[in-house]
Structures are given as C-alpha cells and as structure tokens.
C-alpha cells in the first residue's frame, strides 16, 4: 500500500462501505448518485490504479486501489437524499435539496460576515443580503458540493456551516497573504493571522500526497505560516 492508497483508506469510504453505513444496497446508492441527489465521489480510482480527484483532476500513476471514495460525512447527505426521494420524483427532490443547501449556506455566510470576515459582495454594512452576490456564492457552492469537491477539501463536509467556514477562511487568508506581500503590515495587523491559520488547518482536509503540493493547505498553512515566522519584527 503506497502513501496515496493509505490516505484514501484512512480518510475515505468506498461506495460499498458508504452504502452499508447508510443501510443501502450498492445499487440503491448508485441510483441516488445517478439522479444527482448525493455528491459525487471525491476520488475515483480506475482499474489501472489511476486516480481522478474531483478538485485536481487526473493522476494517472497513483497506484491506488480501484474504487469510488467518499468522505464519511456523505452519510448525512445520503439521509437527506433518501428523504427527499421518498417524497417526490428525482427532479423535484434535486431542486428541494439544492434549495435547502443554498439556504443553509447563505445563513452560514451571514454568520461569517458578522463574525469572521466582511463579505461586501454578499452583504451590506448593516448585514442585509445583496441578492446577486449571495446568489452567485451559493450557486458556486452547490456546484462544488455536487461534484464531490467539498468532500475532498473540507474536514466536516456534512455541514453547510463547516463548508462555508473553510471556504471563507481560505478566501480571507489568501487575501491577507496577498496584501502582506504587496504592502507589508505592522506586527499588530499580523497578530490574528496565526489563529486564523490554525482555524483553517482544522477546517480543511490534509489532502492526499499527490495533491498536497498544489493544495490550499500548503499555501495557507505551511507556506504562509513560514512567511509569518520569517517576517522581520519591525515591518
């Protein structure tokens, strides 16, 4: 077992294991996936060991065990999907799940706008929603969710709030790092950054060995942390 295979088996479930944990036959899970009611696998490994990452694409020589791999947090979404599917046809169920996800994600963004970082594209200074910006954010999040991307990069992808937290921490740290590189900052203005980095590290997945060099975790935890540790004290 190589490092990538070990990572998948440590952090993810195969489709068969996910189905069993949800009390489903594999074919029943496949039906929910085919109808777009459950997020796609975050990783798919072909018979030749080549890996497809929902976020980073193809790694043809991964040497991993064939299968479809899902974050264990997908269990929560399977339960919601089964409930929706039992009440209506697939199209109606999918629309209901999208509406629920996007509503909860918007609520999470409003909380983060107040407590973590201003989101001026989505909320005004009084916290009132700005429809166009908020709609764009929730639509993008739904697309990424359905593709299995959040199962790959978010430590707790069973919660819209946890997903939104990871995304806004990533956005905030990226902007802060860019601003620091362009203009420098006083020690006081850097004081909260170690805490934000630690919070982001807890919110994000470790990423597989193949993906880590290209990951937000490397940029914002390892690299940015090193930037801060090496910054002159008087700048």
Image (spheres, rainbow, N blue to C red):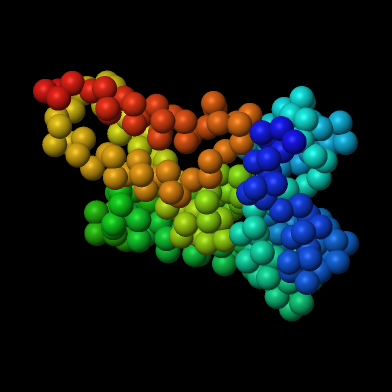
The quarter holding residue 197 reads: top left
Furthest-left residue in this view: 234
Counting the numbered discs, the total is 0
The quarter holding residue 223 reads: top left
Q: Position of residue 99 (x, y in %)?
A: 58, 65
Q: Is residue 32 visible?
A: no
Furthest-bottom residue in this view: 87
Q: Is residue 211 visible?
A: yes
Apparent side of residue 61 relative to residue 181 in the rendered image (left or right): right
Nearest the camera: 31 or 198?
198
Apparent side of residue 225 relative to residue 99 in the rendered image (left or right): left
Q: Position of residue 124 (x, y in %)?
A: 29, 54
Q: Residue at x 78, y 55 (%)?
A: 15
Nearest the camera: 90 or 231?
231
The quarter holding residue 130 reads: bottom left
Nearest the camera: 145 or 7?
7
Apparent side of residue 103 relative to residue 86 in the rendered image (left or right): left
Q: Look at the picture and state if 161 lies above or below 204.
A: below
Q: Position of residue 176 (x, y in %)?
A: 30, 34
Q: Residue at x 43, y 49 (%)?
A: 202
Q: Residue at x 81, y 32 (%)?
A: 49
Apparent side of residue 64 relative to residue 100 in the rendered image (left or right): right
Quadrant of the image containing the N terminus: top right
Q: Look at the picture and state if 97 lies above or below 226.
A: below
Q: Position of residue 103 (x, y in %)?
A: 50, 64
Quadrant of the image containing the C terminus: top left
Q: Look at the picture and state if 164 lies above or below 91.
A: above
Q: Residue at x 42, y 43 (%)?
A: 201
């Amino acid at each position: 077992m190589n490092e990538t295979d070990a990572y998948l088996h440590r952090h993810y479930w195969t489709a068969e294991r996910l189905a069993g944990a949800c009390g489903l036959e594999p074919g029943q899970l496949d039906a929910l996936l085919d109808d777009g009611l459950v997020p796609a696998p975050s990783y798919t490994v072909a018979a030749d060991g080549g890996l497809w990452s929902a976020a980073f694409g193809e790694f043809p020589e991964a040497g991993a065990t064939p299968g479809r791999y899902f974050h264990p947090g997908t269990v929560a979404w399977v339960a919601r999907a089964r409930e929706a599917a039992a009440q209506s046809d697939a199209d109606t169920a999918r629309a209901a799940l999208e509406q629920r996800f996007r509503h909860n994600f918007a609520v999470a963004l409003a909380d983060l706008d107040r407590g973590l970082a201003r989101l001026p594209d989505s909320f005004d200074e009084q916290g009132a929603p700005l429809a166009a910006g908020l709609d764009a954010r929730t639509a993008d999040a739904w697309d990424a969710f359905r593709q299995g991307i959040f199962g790959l990069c978010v430590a707790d992808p069973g919660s819209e709030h946890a997903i939104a937290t990871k995304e806004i921490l990533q956005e905030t740290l990226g902007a802060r790092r860019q601003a620091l590189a362009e203009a420098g900052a006083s020690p006081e203005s850097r004081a909260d950054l170690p805490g934000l980095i630690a919070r982001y590290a807890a919110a994000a997945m470790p990423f597989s060995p193949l993906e880590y060099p290209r990951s937000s975790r490397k940029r914002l935890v390892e690299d940015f942390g090193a930037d801060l540790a090496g910054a002159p004290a008087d700048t």
